Image (cartoon, rainbow, N blue to C red):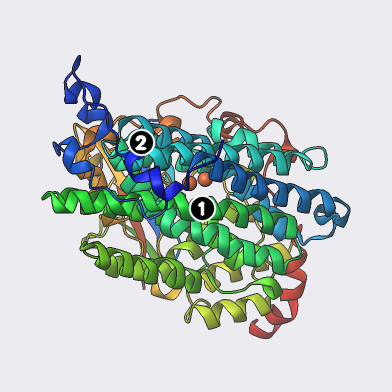
């Protein structure tokens, strides 16, 4: 366990939030942790796979890649977007 | 003894300058405090303040103003505004007093700095009066809310907010420190009086006065109109300072200060005044939308004033116009969702009638912010209250100190502007906020926003409760809650069924 703070924007939500993830979390787990603070709160649930990318990047991180493997720095900004 | 008319002696006395012989001009007016940009005393003597007054005239006019405001207050004490006004209006009062009252003392410092360190005699003279103006504003805006303290502890934040670590108070302080207390005399003339007071205080004090009168709160209306008469006088100190700078080849430096101050003022206004005008003020008492006020008081006014002086519109004018359509809707949603961290009770302002009004004033509102409010409203109706409060912190801009937001819903667009500087990663809510940082990193680089402080372990325990305590809330009654205790959601029920 190693807590790792990131800032995350979630598709269709209005802001960026501080989300504490774990270095060993996969990108799917990261997406879940971000979604917890957005979906059903201000964003309606929808179908589709949630994917993580560096903020504004066109490339998605592989779903199984861990935070440690991703090269993300603490407090960097990520987006969680839907892949329909 | 007969008094000589002011016009016979004013020019002569105010231009009677000391000729320093024991110290150098630079020792008398050090650049760091004065901001003269190397322009010599004789050149600053051409500064011509458009408004001239003498001490006896000033005292008698100010006495009348105070007597007027205090007598309206005394006469209307029985009107029981607190008991009778809409809770949204009461929230507007609380937000205003907490954000402004003690901040007036920062303005006292700024005026004092000009009164001592400006090389322009007319500026020093005007600023001496300006200093007394700002003292009056501080005192009167602490006295008026005081009667409400016994009814509602949130009014105590008129006094406490500015000295607390509450996020909106930090945003206000960071801004006022940047344009007032952390700047030299000429910068204060440009950034406080020209950039902030000419347009923005006009809008806060006259725009809100109109809404107040409409809401039946004549006490508040007469109070802030009275303050604005001082503002419109001492706001005139910046223009002639800009003229001296431009005439002496310092246009670029002057323009930059104007650009920084207008943008920073805008962002703070969008979070404090935007929600009060478009969401808290009851629909039937809204004189104009926030956007309409902005166009009338800020856009029109600045475009004229800048061009008249020979300055340019700030480089970010197009971004500014886009922001006016969007920013405060997201700020409002953030303040409402994180409402326990405010010293006032945010009104949601999203009944079907209010949403129609928002859609009319801001076409596309429903498919943007409306999408989020749909989810929130349904949660309230279904009693899922755990979902209408936050469990984490919003990310905060390292310049404005306000959460990083964008457009939600169908047109989703959230963009962060980051910068790595001396090994630290900073995040900004706009390109302009980042640009401001880059103009003078030393001015800003050591400041920690609330999230930075949280991550640095300065807020203990590291929970929402710990954060609320850190922000200065002494009990649950002081923390913001929904202004109407969610009664608005009832009115949304039929609409919700229709769309379901
Ligand atoms: Fe003032
Ligand atoms: Fe002022």
Q: Is residue B362 left or right of residue B481?
A: left
Q: Nearer the viewer, residue A9 or B413?
A: B413
Name the residue that disc number 2 marks: B114
| Residue B151 coordinates in the image, percent (x, y) | 82, 42
The image position of residue B137, as x and y in percent, is 58, 42
Q: Residue B127, labelled with which disc?
A: none
Check the residue under mark 2 and report the chain it is in. Answer: B
**Residue in the picture at 23% in, 29% down:** B32
Q: Give the total number of marks visible in the rendering.
A: 2
Q: Residue at x 70, y 60 (%)?
A: B88
- Can you give x and y, in whole percent of width and height, for residue B286 in the image? 64, 72
Identify the image quadrant of residue B298. bottom left
Q: Residue furthest top?
A: B22
Label annotation for residue A36: 1
Q: Secondary structure at mark 1?
A: helix
Seen from this angle, which residue lies furthest right? B78
Q: Quadrant of the N terminus of chain B?
A: top right
Q: Is residue B237 above or below residue B183?
A: below
In the image: residue B417, left or right of residue A31:
left
Tell us which disc is closer to us: 2 or 1: 2
Q: Secondary structure at mark 2?
A: helix
Towards the viewer: B46 or B171: B46
- The answer to whether residue B277 is left or right of residue B393 is right
Residue placed most toward the observer, B216 or B472: B216
Taking the spot 21% from the left edge, 64% from the top edge, the residue there is B312
**Disc 2 + disc 1, Cβ < 8 Å:** no
Q: Is mark 1 within 8 Å of ligand 1?
A: no
> As displayed, is residue B67 above or below residue B476?
below
Left or right side of B61 for B173: left
Can residue B489 be seen in the rendering of this structure? yes
Query: Which x, y percent locates residue B59?
Result: 58, 41
């Amino acid at each position: 366990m190693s807590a790792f703070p990131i800032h995350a924007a979630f598709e269709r939500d209005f802001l960026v939030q501080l989300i504490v993830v774990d270095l060993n979390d996969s990108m799917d787990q990261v997406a879940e942790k971000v979604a917890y603070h957005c979906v059903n709160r201000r964003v309606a649930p929808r179908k589709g796979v949630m994917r993580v990318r560096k903020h504004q990047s066109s490339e998605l991180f592989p779903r199984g890649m861990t935070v440690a493997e991703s090269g993300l720095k603490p407090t960097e900004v990520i987006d969680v977007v839907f892949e329909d | 003894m007969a008094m000589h008319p002011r016009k016979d002696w004013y020019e002569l006395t105010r231009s009677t300058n000391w000729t320093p012989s024991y110290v150098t001009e630079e020792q008398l007016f050090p650049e760091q405090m004065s901001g003269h940009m190397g322009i010599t005393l004789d050149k600053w003597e051409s500064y011509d303040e458009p408004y001239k007054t003498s001490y006896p005239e000033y005292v008698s006019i100010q006495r009348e103003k105070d007597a007027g405001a205090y007598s309206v207050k005394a006469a209307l004490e029985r009107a029981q505004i607190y008991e009778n006004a809409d809770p949204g209006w009461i929230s507007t009062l609380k937000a205003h007093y907490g954000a402004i009252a003690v901040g007036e003392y920062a303005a006292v410092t700024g005026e004092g700095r000009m009164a001592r360190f400006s090389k322009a005699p007319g500026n020093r003279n005007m600023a001496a009066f300006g200093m007394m103006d700002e003292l009056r504003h501080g005192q009167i805006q602490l006295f008026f809310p005081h009667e409400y303290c016994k009814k509602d502890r949130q009014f105590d934040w008129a006094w406490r907010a500015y000295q607390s670590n509450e996020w909106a108070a930090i945003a206000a302080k960071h801004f006022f420190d940047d344009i007032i207390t952390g700047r030299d005399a000429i910068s204060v003339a440009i950034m406080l009086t020209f950039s902030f007071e000419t347009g923005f205080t006009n809008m806060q004090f006259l725009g809100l006065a109109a809404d107040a009168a409409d809401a039946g709160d004549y006490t508040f209306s007469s109070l802030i109109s009275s303050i604005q008469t001082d503002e419109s006088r001492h706001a005139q100190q910046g223009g002639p300072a800009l003229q001296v700078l431009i005439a002496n080849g310092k246009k670029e430096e002057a323009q930059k200060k104007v650009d920084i101050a207008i943008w920073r003022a805008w962002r703070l206004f969008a979070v404090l005044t935007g929600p009060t005008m478009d969401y808290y003020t009851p629909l039937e008492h809204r004189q104009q939308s926030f956007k309409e006020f902005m166009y009338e008081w800020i856009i029109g006014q600045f475009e004229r004033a800048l061009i008249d002086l020979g300055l340019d519109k700030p480089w970010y004018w197009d971004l500014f116009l886009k922001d006016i359509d969007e920013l405060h809707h997201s700020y409002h949603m953030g303040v409402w969702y994180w409402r326990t961290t405010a010293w006032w009770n945010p009104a949601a302002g999203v009944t079907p009638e209010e949403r129609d009004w928002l859609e009319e004033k801001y076409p596309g509102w429903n498919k943007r912010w409306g999408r989020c409010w749909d989810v929130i409203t349904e949660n309230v109706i279904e009693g899922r209250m755990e979902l209408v409060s936050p469990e984490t912190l919003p990310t905060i801009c390292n310049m404005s100190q306000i959460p990083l937001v964008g457009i939600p819903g169908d047109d989703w667009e959230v963009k962060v502007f980051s910068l790595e500087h001396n090994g630290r990663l900073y995040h900004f809510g706009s390109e302009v906020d980042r640009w401001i940082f880059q103009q003078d990193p030393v001015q800003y680089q050591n400041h920690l926003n609330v999230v930075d402080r949280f991550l640095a372990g300065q807020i203990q325990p590291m929970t929402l409760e710990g954060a609320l305590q850190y922000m200065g809330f002494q009990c649950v009654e002081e923390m913001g809650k929904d202004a109407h205790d969610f009664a608005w959601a009832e009115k949304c029920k039929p609409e919700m069924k229709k769309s379901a």
